[in-house]
Amino acid sequence: MLDLNFVRGNLPLVEAKLRARGADPASLLGDFRSLDQKRREAITQSEQLKARRNELSQQVGALKKAGKDATALMDETRSLKDRLDDLDKLASSLDEQMRLALSSIPNLTRDEVPIGTSEADNAVVKTWGEKRAFDFEPKPHWEIGEALGILDLERAAKLSGARFAVYMGAGARLERALISFMLDRHTRPVAEQGHGYTEVLPPFMVNSKSLFGTGQLPKFAEDLFRCSDADAEAATRGEFKDADHWLIPTAEVPVTNLYRDEILEEDRLPICLTAYTPCFRAEAGAAGKDTRGIIRQHQFQKVELVKFTRPEDSDDEHEKLTRDAEEILEALGLPYRRVLLCTGDTGFSSAKTFDLEVWLPGQQLYREISSCSNFESFQARRANIRFRAAGQGPKGKVEFVHTLNGSGLAVGRTWLAILENYQQADGSVVIPEALRPYMGGLERITK
């Protein structure tokens, strides 16, 4: 969420940034200046009337003490109370309108983010690894997996419908091996060639306030799976309950909200956390997209990286987080590229995002396998996550942290990338050396 004072003082800039995202400022902001003016006028009038009421109360007390008639002043006091009740209701309504307006505004993208409307305008900033030269026609992962008997999409559809998968035998073990490999690399100390994150195992269901904190609610309710106690209608209006539940779309949600409504000490920053979770997405806007294979699923596994940093450190930590994800791909020998997303392709809460895209020879294209984003203070303001400057005691300066996150990596997409990049002419799949200890020494998956 953006700061009200910032929007108020920089409205032309906010409007320009929204247009750069391809959004209509009028539809998001409405008549912001008029709403803000009415709200401030209501607050000012309320404060003036309260001051007058306090003054009258003192005068009434003085008159009564002197044995004089205070009826007129008491009548005025009662009249003020009715007016104050009406003003308080108006101010509360205007406050709610302002809160909803601010919650609907996406984060402002950084100046270095290229202006564009779609992924076609994203900028490739780095390419790693050589694409393998095949002496046969490489197959897509769904053909490889089905032929090896390690991926069963038909039975998954029987169990749950479209966009689900069943992994069998070595396929299931490969998924588990990838999760363990990623977590081990991320949690190993930096001195031991790891990344130094602390592992978290969070709940897989969260309440509406958590989804608001990271930016999924109220705007993206249709992309989520809600439990029977969750009121989607109320959520889209910004009315959140503590006791309702939604399935998480990513571990970013519970892990970021660990520190919601807390003040962290500066010397604890940066806090670097990693978590494995299943993820659940309704894919409401993905009808007809990626219907083959396991690219776009309702349920998938992911290892997530989350950081809480000081504002002045977030750029450096964003680069480190992105490198941590890249090193997983490099350790597995999977060619990839880093892409800086344009304004129109950058997510709602992000100020700047790097996508990592892995090469898939069976489909002859690059596919996103991780999005590494710097949200600056946008999520922290929504979730009220702050830090206190070091060395200043309990009354030290308090400000919002910067939050960052990225996939380290999407496990299913890494799984299919291994199948496509390591497939052999006889239909088998060679296991990358880094994974063999996690596969009980297995070097190749065969039928």
Image: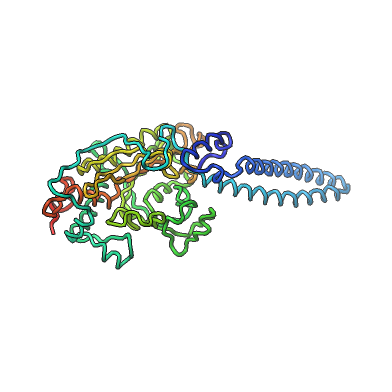
Give the percent coordinates (x, y) of residue 287: 38, 57
Q: How many marks?
A: 0
Residue that extends furthest to the right in the rendered view of this protein: 68
Q: Name which quarter of the figure residue 226 lies in.
A: bottom left
The colour scheme of the drawn protein is rainbow
Measured as percent of width and height from the top left, residue 2 is found at 51, 40
Residue 386 visible somewhere in the drawing? no
The residue lying at 47 percent from left, 63 percent from top is: 229
128 relative position to 24: left or right = left
Seen at 51% across and 36% down, the residue is 16
Q: Which is nearer the eye, 306 or 189?
A: 306
| Picture coordinates of residue 125, whole percent (x, y) | 31, 34
User: What residue is shown at x 41% (from left), y 46% (from top)?
Assistant: 256
Q: Nearer the viewer, residue 131 or 438?
A: 131
Query: Is 53 rendered above or below residue 203?
Result: above
> Which residue of the protein is positioned furthest toward the left in this rendering?
426
Q: Is residue 388 visible?
A: yes
Above or below, 2 relative to 75: above
Determine whether, in the image, residue 206 is placed left or right of residue 94.
Answer: left
Q: Nearer the viewer, residue 19 or 262?
A: 19
Residue shown at 45% from the left, 45% from the top: 348
Can you say which quadrant of the picture contains the C terminus?
A: bottom left
Percent across and percent down for residue 84 are 72, 49
